[in-house]
Image (cartoon, rainbow, N blue to C red):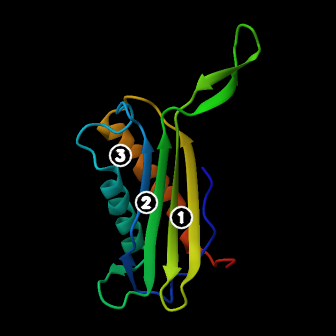
Amino acid sequence: MELGLNADLSQYQSYAWLETVTTLNDPSGQWQPSGLDIAGEIKFFIDRELSDHGLYLSSSNPELAVSFQLGANMQALKLKNDPDSKLAVLTNVPDAALMVVLIDTATNNIIWISKAEAEIQQHDSKEIVLKRIDYTITEMFKALTRKSFF
């Protein structure tokens, strides 16, 4: 996991959601458990983190705009060493990436961006997927306690 750049949110009180982008290359339904709205769950966890940082959701004149992009590829391939032959073998290793962006609405400048990447498992339960998303977003937002380099 790569953690985001730091930002000082003390000058902001409100935020609104921008359109999010989700790219899920999972045609056989191997990753997203049935009945799970991953984009909705990500929004829920980001809302929680922003609230924990003293921000509230506002539909009129928000000071921050929030967006995220999720990409998952169940057909991703990587070279991995075969334990028997010790040779690099092309292997299916499903992966995902999540990027969260905070934008100052007065200046349209990005004030914070964070990215997390992980290998993902096929056929995980809804509970495991939610725990991994919760953990990832919690870790991403820990960087918001310090000043930004933007």
Up the image or down, 15 lies above or below 69; here it is below
Q: Which mark is residue 72?
A: none
Q: Residues within 10 Å of mark 3 (few under 14, many from 20)?
A: some
Identify the residue shown where x is 38% and y is 41%: 129
Q: Marks 3 and 1, how far apart in space?
A: 18 Å
Find the distance from the CA under tag 2 to the CA under tag 1: 23 Å
> What distance separates the C-alpha of mark 2 from that of mark 3?
19 Å
Task: Please indicate whether residue 39 sits to the left or right of residue 113 in the image.
Answer: left
Q: In this figure, which residue is indicated by the disc labeled 2?
A: 21
As drawn, the residue found furthest toward the right would be 86
The amino acid pointed to by label 2 is Val
* Residue mark closest to the camera, 2 vs 1: 2
Q: Which mark is residue 130?
A: 3
Secondary structure found at label 2: strand
For disc 1, the marked residue is: 142
Q: Is residue 58 left or right of residue 79?
A: left
User: Dot 3: what SS?
Assistant: helix
Q: Residue at x 50, y 74 (%)?
A: 102
Q: Quadrant of residue 13?
A: bottom left
Across and down, in percent, residue 47 comes to 35, 68
Q: Is residue 43 above or below residue 60?
A: above
